[in-house]
Image (tube, grey):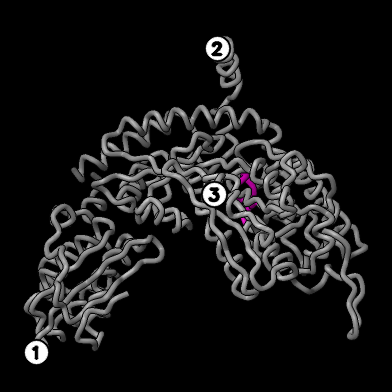
Amino acid sequence: MDIKVETTKKKIEAYDVEKIRKDFPILFQKVHGKNLCYLDNAATTQKPQSVIDEVIKYYETINSNVHRGVHSLSEMATQAYEESRNKVRDFINASSEKEIIFTRGTTEGINLVAQSFGRMNLKDGDEVIISTMEHHSNIVPWQMICEEKNAKLKVIPINENGELIFEEFEELLTEKTKIVSVVYVSNSLGTINPVKKIIEKAHSFGVPVLLDGAQAIQHFRVDVQDLDCDFFAFSGHKIYGPTGIGILFGKKALLESMPPYMGGGDMISKVTFEKTTYNQLPYKFEAGTPNIADTIGLGKALEYVNQIGIDKIAVYEKELLDYATESLSQIEGLKIIGQAKEKSSVISFVFDIVHPHDVGTFLDFEGIAVRTGHHCTQPVMDRFNIPATARASFALYNTKEEVDVLVNGLKKVLEVFS
Amino acid sequence: MDSELRELYQQVILDHNKSPRNFRVIENANHYSEGFNPLCGDRIDVYLDVENGIVKDISFQGRGCAISKASASLMSSMVKGKTVEEAEKLFEKFHDLITGKLDDDPDIKELGKLAVFAGVRDFPARVKCASLAWHTMINALKEENDIVTTE
């Protein structure tokens, strides 16, 4: 036991957070005269200088359209763009670049699967399974297609700690189930779901599984082959990359069986007015000129995470989470919403006497950025019978000192309201 | 506390947040509406008893931040006894106040205690909090049903 603690300590010591912070220029500014303490990382993460530089360099040196020109700039842009695809493939350990589709973000990835896979496979009376802790982006696209196809949306309930009730999931799975679409890590509760178990169970019924990985990808290693998930969607901006670029991973055989999601340039191989032949994977799902600069920026962001090491990041963030959970629990009247055994570095909390919005405004004047509201998970708020929470979410550049700043800020709020 | 913050969270607002006035249901209300702020999940129910164009009684229930709760509480105190037209005019003035369109001293004086919400104009994200109760009341007054509308 002692030896284990020693090794963990050693790893933390090797993690130079002060050096890492220097890579993020935005962190060194004052808000309302106080040092910025950015704890809204589940909403979006800050970008390291290398990512910012990469996007600027693209526009300054090789901006041109991809997959089109024979001229040098277009060839260079295409090469950089496709290199990013390979970096993503490597990062999530997909077996082929054909399985990596560029989207605008997680939301578009889920909509793509709902509109393409869903439209093709759902019929009257079929069922789709999601969970209570889904982000609205993994609820509404399924509601839309279910309504169109007269299919049913089934919801896995959660317990008081904010964990999925696995037995209930088993009950919901039937021969009518056509797809299971669940969140890997909850954005409002921090719960890490037992997705491997879910996938195994769903596969035993021959049902494919989509994972909403928006809050997972930046926190720990994701290996889509090991997970054996059928689809995996995430956003670049949550993993230190630019906004407007996301990834949908899909197993090749499934993607090949699915119809295109949008029509246009780049997704075709031959067009006549009588018939159009679609392009091969992944281009079949990438109509129109893509977001080239930010795609290249995402590649750079993944490179940055690799340099530090995602496993080291996971250990460091767990340490931060434990420290923050312990520190916040000491505050009288503070209740943490979401106390799952397996959690990522997200802490949602409420007070009896202060509404989260007031907490948010007061903390802002201390330079602290937290998210307040329902976090696009209204069913979770309903489940816990609360209108909203305040949420502190931590990233690889946050420190224990910042946790202390948060705790002191909250104590000041309580002084005013009690 | 920062001065801008103190301007927003005045003592009157903190007081009404802690002990809101008219925080109850009017059983025989002839006007009712439910207000909802989809951005933050706050909700409020406003009940009115209107006779001959005069607000005889007004109450509210619901949950929200200090700004929205205090606003509902002060609104209920201010509107009671006023005519429907007066209440509507008061809302227009109040809305101008919280969106920073009201600078004239006489106008602000007319608002009485509601002037404590002047600080909201520096917090555009909180305008909806301060106006939710009012929008709900105006909606309730437009309801032509003589009975409480149920969900």
**Residue A233 at x, y = what percent?**
67, 53
Report x, y in % for residue A15.
Answer: 59, 24
Describe the element under mark 1 as helix, strand or loop: loop
Marks 2 and 3 close (CB-CB < 8 Å): no
What whole-number distance in Å separates the C-alpha atoms at marks 1 and 2? Answer: 79 Å
* Residue displayed at 67% across by 65% down: A114
Quarter of the image where one finds residue A280: bottom right
The residue that mark 3 highlights is: A168
* Count of residue discs: 3
The reply to whether label 2 and label 3 mark residues of one chain is: yes
| Magenta residues (range) | A234-243
| Left or right for A329, reference A332 | right
Residue that label 2 marks: A1
Q: Which residue is at 61% across, 43% downward?
A: A216
Where's the C terminus of chain A, which quadrant? top left
Spot occupied by residue A283 in the image (x, y as percentages of width and height)? 83, 62
